[in-house]
Image (cartoon, rainbow, N blue to C red):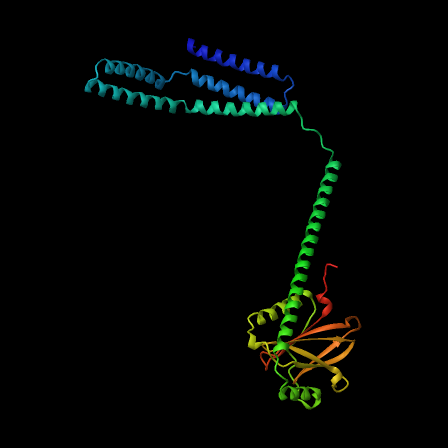
């Protein structure tokens, strides 16, 4: 065995002994994971020592290129001729080439050095965790805390939903009040601008008062609004129709709705005035007791049943803008009451 080889082996052994001794001094009770990390670090340090100590032609070539470059630089500084400048550039090129060759030859050593650094970081983190272990968590306590947080979150969401519902109900009620006021204004303006009743209107009422002598009307075209949302949409549609109503269009003759019990003929007691709003839109109101009825407007008839729990005041919206397809809508006035009370 040559003297250089013996020196490499002794150097590796010294590094290994130093690493083990340092680790043992740092933590005499290493965990199995820490022991495995120490072993990997020691092995890679031995490999790195052998690689760094081995003779490399590239290192000798770089040393020679460095000497040539120093000499060429000194010659150029002494006499800055074209020839010396060319020699300097050639020396610089050869040095760069030799440096690249050495870096390529040392790539394996650089890789080992990076691995050693990563292993050391892992070992340090493991030792730090062993010195400061995480506190033990009571499973039951953690579960109770999680359940408490979940309950608080549900309560918070329910409160948010309640507040959102209240805001929507308040906004809806404001819109209803606005539309009611607008329709009342339209109704008053229509009545003020209305012309005297025409004979045709009287004739229409006479026909409606004797429904059994008139031809039966269509069964469709009647809508009973059950929810506040449906009522609000109907009022908004009506308001949109009347939004651009001109002054000369506000006049009109009131129409008549008969709400007669099904078992008898209609009389004047069954008459409900539908006040003209303009553009063949009408609005009326009446109190209805439980029973079976027939709604009659001109030649149009619709059946209606009111149960005991449904008695109350009802609003009627009649659209006769398309006479061949008239539409009658009704809803309980209680829907107009505030839902926030």
Determine whether, in the image, residue 192 is placed left or right of residue 332: left
Q: In which quarter of the image is residue 144?
A: top right
Residue 126: image location, x then y, percent: 61, 25
Residue 130, position as x, y percentages in the image:
65, 24
Spot occupied by residue 296 in the image (x, y as percentages of width and height): 69, 82
Viewer can see residue 261? no
Closer to the camera in the image, 101 or 260: 260
Quarter the C terminus occupies: bottom right
- Quadrant in the picture for the N terminus: top left
Residue positioned 43% across, 17% down in the render? 52
109 shown above or below 265: above
Residue extending farthest to the left is 82
Image quarter for residue 277? bottom right
Q: Is residue 115 visible?
A: yes
> Which residue in the rendered view is the most extreme toward the top?
3
In the image, farthest residue toward the bottom: 213
35 left or right, relative to 83: right
Q: Which residue is drawn at 33% across and 21% down?
A: 98
233 in relation to 33, above or below: below
The number of callouts visible is: 0
Q: In which quarter of the image is residue 275?
A: bottom right
Q: In this view, does 206 lie to the left or right of 324?
A: right
The residue furthest right is: 308
On the picture, is 2 further left or further right than 38?
A: left
Check the image and report above or below for 216 versus 290. below
Place of residue 119 in the rendered image (x, y in percent of width and height, measured from the top left): 54, 24
Q: 23 or 140, which is in the foreground?
A: 140
Q: Which of 318 and 101 is in front in this view?
A: 318
């Amino acid at each position: 065995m040559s003297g250089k080889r013996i020196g490499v082996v002794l150097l590796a052994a010294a590094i290994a002994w130093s690493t083990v001794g340092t680790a043992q001094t740092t933590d005499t009770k290493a965990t199995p994971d820490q022991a495995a990390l120490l072993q990997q670090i020691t092995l890679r340090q031995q490999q790195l020592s052998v690689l760094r100590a081995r003779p490399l032609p590239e290192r000798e070539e770089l040393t020679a290129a460095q000497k040539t470059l120093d000499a060429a630089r000194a010659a150029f500084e002494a006499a800055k001729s074209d020839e010396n400048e060319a020699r300097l550039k050639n020396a610089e090129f050869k040095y760069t080439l030799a440096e690249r060759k050495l870096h390529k030859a040392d790539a394996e050593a650089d890789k080992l050095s990076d691995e050693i650094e990563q292993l050391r970081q892992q070992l340090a983190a493991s030792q730090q965790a062993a010195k400061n272990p995480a506190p033990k968590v009571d499973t039951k306590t953690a579960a109770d805390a999680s359940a408490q947080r979940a309950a608080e979150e549900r309560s918070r969401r329910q409160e948010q939903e309640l507040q959102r519902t209240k805001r929507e109900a308040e906004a809806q009620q404001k819109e209803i009040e606005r539309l009611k006021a607008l329709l009342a204004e339209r109704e008053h303006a229509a009545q003020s601008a209305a012309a005297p009743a025409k004979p045709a209107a009287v004739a229409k009422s006479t026909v409606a008062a004797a429904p059994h002598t008139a031809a039966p009307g269509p069964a469709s075209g009647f809508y009973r609004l059950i929810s506040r949302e449906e009522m609000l949409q109907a009022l908004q549609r009506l308001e949109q129709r009347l939004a651009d109503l001109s002054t000369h269009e506000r006049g009109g003759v009131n129409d008549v709705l008969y709400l007669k019990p099904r078992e008898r003929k209609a009389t004047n007691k069954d008459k409900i005035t539908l006040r003209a709003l303009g553009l063949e839109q009408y609005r009326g109101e009446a109190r209805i007791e439980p029973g079976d009825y027939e709604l009659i407007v001109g030649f149009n008839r619709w059946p209606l049943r009111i149960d005991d729990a449904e008695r109350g005041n009802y609003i009627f919206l009649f659209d006769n803008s398309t006479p061949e397809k008239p539409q009658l809508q009704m809803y309980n006035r209680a829907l107009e009451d505030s839902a926030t009370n």
